[in-house]
Image (cartoon, rainbow, N blue to C red):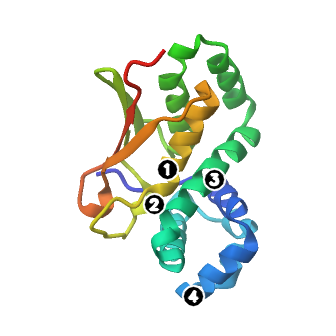
Amino acid sequence: MTQPALSPALMALFVETIGQDTFSAALSKAGLPVEWARPEKYASMDAAQAAQSYARLQSALRMYYGRGARGILLRIGSNLWDRMIKDAPFSIKAQASLIRGLPKSLRRKPALELLARILGAKRGDITVHTLDLDLLLVDRASPATLDQSDDTPICFVTLGLIRECLYWAVGEEHDIEERACRATGARQCEFKITTGGRS
């Protein structure tokens, strides 16, 4: 099983995306230090520490928002995609431009592979597969699930990232389902993207 890891820069971006006021209230309720709401806190972390913080902060947000957490974390994931692309190094931006230049019907898988490249701490952490007419994103590290246990999948931020990445690529909404999650005891997190053979 792959050890969860996350880029500290990505962790800082995640914190910026949430917004300090909301974040501080959630942290206080979860008993976590308020300084966790400051993006600069994560600059000195290694990838394992960033992954641990990512999981704990998402857990705090789920606890704070209760039943409304799914929708809020999906929105955070969607907003995070925009920041990731905007703050990406030149090589990622160049790849993004190439993807947007492809015919629309050929953009989905490369767009998800770009997301995997940005999100994965190392090559092979996240892979994208063709599943008949649909797509499957497999996250073997899944830092959001570190030390988490639940009856149902919890990777709402990743779902939001996938949703926004595909919308950025083709300008269409997609049905996305997390059909396996490490928090529920699965070996890896799996997200099925229904394209239905759309062009």
Residue 29 is marked as: 4
Q: Which amino acid does label 3 sit on?
A: Leu
Question: What amino acid does circle 2 point to?
Answer: Ala
Contact (CB < 8 A) between labels 3 and 1? Answer: no
Q: Distance between the residues labelled 3 and 1?
A: 13 Å
Residue bearing the label numbered 1: 158
Disc number for residue 144: 2
Residue found at the far top of this picture: 103
Q: Image check: 126 left or right of 171?
A: left
Which one is in front in this view, the residue at disc 3 or the one at disc 1? Answer: 1
Secondary structure state at the residue bearing disc 3: helix
Q: Mark 3 points at which residue?
A: 10
Separation of residues labelled 2 and 1 (CA atoms): 9 Å
The mark that comes first in sequence, 2 or 1, is 2
* Residue 125 makes an appearance in the image: no
Measured Cα–Cα span from mark 3 to mark 4: 24 Å
In the figure, residue 43 lies in which quadrant?
bottom right
Which label's residue is closer to the chain start, 3 or 4? 3
In the rendered structure, the answer to whether residue 89 lies left or right of residue 137 reads: right
Three-letter residue code for mark 1: Thr
4 and 2 marks in contact (CB < 8 Å): no
